[in-house]
Image: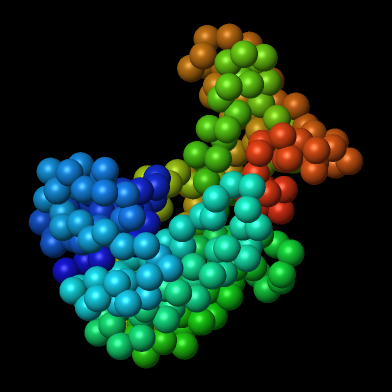
């Protein structure tokens, strides 16, 4: 049995669907009862649990042998680093005496030690703590998610603009969440023989200009990339109604 923690998002949902398509038994952990029927129709078992509920999480973990772990993002507007550290701590506590054989955990290229780095520091700490567990752990560090550009769809459609903190011609490694999900499912199904770290990115690097060109083609209107001056970063990120540090970490991976 495979346990999926984080099946509601772009990555976890693909992990679950890939395993199900391979005929594997899958249990989805969610706190949203409305999603139960969706996953049951796909052939999955659904466990209703909150990530802060250590006892219930542990009981669900005991049903399976392999776990895909995605630390859920904190609510926008909260102190995301603090809240996400809390969920990491609860999940790690629930792993004790769980009987799991192995874990595949989602992380990021930018994972690094630090307290003012948003989820970059949180995920680094998660990696370090997971590697101390008494079973094999595979960490998958993903490049910048192409889906992050979805936040620019409205401005591209209405104003013909894609805003970026990078120089418009700066190319960086990116990856589609679906590719990350399929890769994670592949690793889950392979024999686990020790701790490993994988890095995943797309076949080439892309710039904001190329993203704008993609929007232009799909929207059938002129779209250009516009760099946000550094002195305007915080103001710009605050307008997104989310923690500026959290938003900044998305650009720094």
Q: Nearer the viewer, residue 92 or 181?
A: 92
Q: Name the residue furthest right.
A: 231
Residue 164 appears in which quarter of the rendering? top right
- Pinpoint residue 132: horizontal percent, then vertical percent: 47, 88
Asked if 205 appears above or below 67 in the picture, the reply is above
- Residue found at x 49% / y 71%: 88
Asked if 37 appears above or below 48 in the picture, the reply is above
Image quadrant occupied by the N terminus = bottom left
Task: Count numbered badges in the picture.
Answer: 0
- Residue found at x 52% / y 9%: 220
- Pinpoint residue 11: horizontal percent, then vertical percent: 39, 50
Confirm whether residue 190 shows in the render: no
Image quadrant occupied by the C terminus = bottom right
Q: Nearer the viewer, residue 87 or 1?
A: 87
Q: Nearer the viewer, residue 224 or 129?
A: 129
Q: Is residue 202 left or right of residue 77?
A: left
Asked if 167 appears above or below 226 in the picture, the reply is below
Q: Is residue 165 left or right of residue 43?
A: right
Confirm whether residue 84 shows in the render: yes
- Pinpoint residue 237: horizontal percent, then vertical percent: 72, 40
- Residue found at x 66% / y 39%: 241
Asked if 235 appears above or below 99 in the picture, the reply is above
- Residue found at x 76% / y 36%: 236
Residue 158 appears in which quarter of the rendering? top right
């Amino acid at each position: 049995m495979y346990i999926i923690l984080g099946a509601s998002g772009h990555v976890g949902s693909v992990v679950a669907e890939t395993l199900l398509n391979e005929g594997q038994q899958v249990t989805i952990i969610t706190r949203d009862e409305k999603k139960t029927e969706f996953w049951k129709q796909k052939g999955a078992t659904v466990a209703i649990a909150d990530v802060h509920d250590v006892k219930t999480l542990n009981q669900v973990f005991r049903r399976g042998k392999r776990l895909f772990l995605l630390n859920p993002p904190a609510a926008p507007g909260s102190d995301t680093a603090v809240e996400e550290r809390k969920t990491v701590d609860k999940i790690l506590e629930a792993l004790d005496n769980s009987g799991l054989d192995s874990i595949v955990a989602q992380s990021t290229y930018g994972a690094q030690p630090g307290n003012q780095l948003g989820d970059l520091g949180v995920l680094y700490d998660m990696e370090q703590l997971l590697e101390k567990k008494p079973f094999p752990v595979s960490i998958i560090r993903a490049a910048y998610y192409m889906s992050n550009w979805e936040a620019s769809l409205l401005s591209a459609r209405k104003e013909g603009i894609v805003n970026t903190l990078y120089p418009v011609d700066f190319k960086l490694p990116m990856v589609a969440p679906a590719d990350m999900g399929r890769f994670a499912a592949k690793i889950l199904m392979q024999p686990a023989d020790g701790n490993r770290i994988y890095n995943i990115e797309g076949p080439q690097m892309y710039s904001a200009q190329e993203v704008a060109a993609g929007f232009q083609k799909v929207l059938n209107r002129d779209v250009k990339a516009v760099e946000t001056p550094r002195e305007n970063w915080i103001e710009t990120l605050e307008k997104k109604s989310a923690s500026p540090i959290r938003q900044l970490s998305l650009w720094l991976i």
